[in-house]
Amino acid sequence: MYTSVPGQHVPYSWLFRWCARAGGAIVVVAWLVFVLVEAARPVAGPPSIAAYYQAAALALVFAGYALGWQKELAGGVLTIVGTIAFFAVHVLTFGMLPGLEAAWFTTPGVLYLLAWKYDERRPDATVQP
């Protein structure tokens, strides 16, 4: 006996958009856990100025995640620019690149850009297979 089930088309933009949103939320929650763990440790002195510059760059990244919920293009670009700024600040303050795992900060931004590219609701968008 053969049975067919009607399939529902899920647009690529929907998939990319929700993966970006989930990925951004996971990164923000993980970062908050790290901040709380660091806050619970005994501190020898005030944070260095480099820590504030890094926090400002990460604030750009997280602002890109939040902006991407409404405007995928702007959120994706801001996330990528913020990650580049984080790498630049790290190189300028410590003289070396951060671990390449920090490049994962760009993943939700790239997914936002893909969601924007494949969005069928955009007036200039062409329908992608």
Image: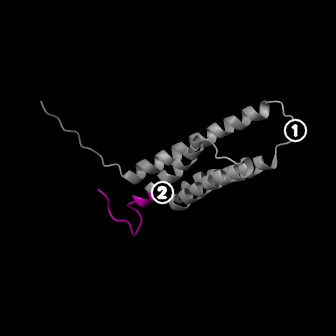
Q: Which residue is mark 2?
A: 113
Residue 4 painted magenta: no
- The answer to which quarter of the image holds residue 88 is bottom right
Position of residue 118 relative to residue 124, above or below, is: above
Kindly report the distance in space between the C-alpha atoms of the residues bearing marks 2 and 1. Answer: 41 Å
Q: Secondary structure at mark 1?
A: loop
Which stretch did the figure color magenta?
115-129
Q: Would residue 47 appear left or right of 35 to someone viewing this image?
A: right
Q: Would residue 86 appear left or right of 1 to someone viewing this image?
A: right
Residue nearest the observer in this picture, 41 or 24: 41
Look at 67% across and 35% down and name the residue there. Answer: 33
Q: Which residue is mark 1?
A: 45
Position of residue 122 relative to residue 115, above or below, is: below
Q: Position of residue 75 (x, y in %)?
A: 56, 57
Residue 118 painted magenta: yes
Q: Position of residue 10 (x, y in %)?
A: 35, 48
Position of the N terminus, as image quadrant, is top left
Identify the residue at the far left of this view.
Answer: 1
Q: Categorize mark 2 by other alpha carbons within 10 Å: few (<14), some (14-19), many (20+).
A: many
Position of residue 47 relative to residue 71, above or below, is: above
Q: Position of residue 122 (x, y in %)?
A: 42, 65
Position of the C terminus, as image quadrant, is bottom left
Examine the residues drawn in magenta and state their main secondary structure.
Answer: loop
- Judge depth for marks 2 and 1 and give the one in front: 1
Look at 57% across and 43% down and name the residue there. Answer: 100
What's the residue type where badge 2 is placed?
Answer: Leu
